[in-house]
Image (cartoon, grey):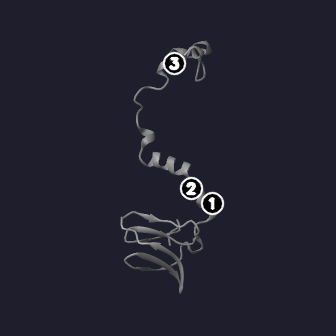
């Protein structure tokens, strides 16, 4: 099993309990399920995935600190970074409407009177 608590089978990844990281596991696949075994004990069962690159992760086998990386905020940021959305140019330059309020006196040099009138 890989260090991310997953085994790979036919280009798809299935999770197993983290206590078996870097250990050999047996895998038995049917048309509908993938079962993971350590010795004669079944340690995880997953629905069989059909799309290459897909991942099936059960919450219970992961260490508690790994569960923090599956929050809605983390998934949103990860999607933005994975898709390169943080590198997309903006349609209009930021602060154009307030550009005359900047005095040129450094990063935070602004004329507050002009800011308050907008």
- Quarter of image, res 60: bottom right
Separation (CA) of disc 2 from disc 3: 38 Å
Q: Position of residue 107 (x, y in %)?
A: 58, 24
Q: Position of residue 109 (x, y in %)?
A: 60, 19
Give me the C-alpha separation between circle 1 and circle 3: 43 Å
For mark 1, does the 10 Å Cα neighbourhood hold few (<14), some (14 to 19), or many (20 or more) residues? few
Is 54 rendered above or below residue 29?
A: above
Asked whether the residues under the numbered discs 1 and 2 touch, taking CB atoms below 8 Å apart as contact, a structural biologist would say: no
Mark 2: secondary structure: helix
In terms of sequence position, does the residue under pointer 1 or pointer 3 come before the other? 1
Residue shown at the point (62%, 15%) measured from the top left: 112
**Where is 11 relative to 77, above or below?**
below
Rendered residue at 56%/53% (across/down) = 71
Q: Residue at x 51, y 51 (%)?
A: 75
| Residue occupying image coordinates x 42% and y 31% | 90
- Disc 3 is placed on an element classified as helix
Q: Earlier in the sequence, mark 2 or mark 3?
A: 2
- The image shows residue 10 at horizontal and vertical percentages of 37, 71
User: Which residue is more in the foreground, 86 or 97?
Assistant: 97
Q: Is residue 39 visible?
A: no
What residue is disc 1 on? Answer: 65
Closest to the observer: 105 or 83? 83
Which residue corresponds to mark 2? 69
What secondary structure is found at the residue carrying circle 1?
helix
Crowding near the residue tagged with mark 3, few <14, some 14–19, many ≥20 C-alpha atoms within 10 Å: few
Q: Residues within 10 Å of mark 2 (few under 14, many from 20)?
A: few
Q: Which mark is residue 98?
A: 3
| Occupied quadrant, residue 63 | bottom right
């Amino acid at each position: 099993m890989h260090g991310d608590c997953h085994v790979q089978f036919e280009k798809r990844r299935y999770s197993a309990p983290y206590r078996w990281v870097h250990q050999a596991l047996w895998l038995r696949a049917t048309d509908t399920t993938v079962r993971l075994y350590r010795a004669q004990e079944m340690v995880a069962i997953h629905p069989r995935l059909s799309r290459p690159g897909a991942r099936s992760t059960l919450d219970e086998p992961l260490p508690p600190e790994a569960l923090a990386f599956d929050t809605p905020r983390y998934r949103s940021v990860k999607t933005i970074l994975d898709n390169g959305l943080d590198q997309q140019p903006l349609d209009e330059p930021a602060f154009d409407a307030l550009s005359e309020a900047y005095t040129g006196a450094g990063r935070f040099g602004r004329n507050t009177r002009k800011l308050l009138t907008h």
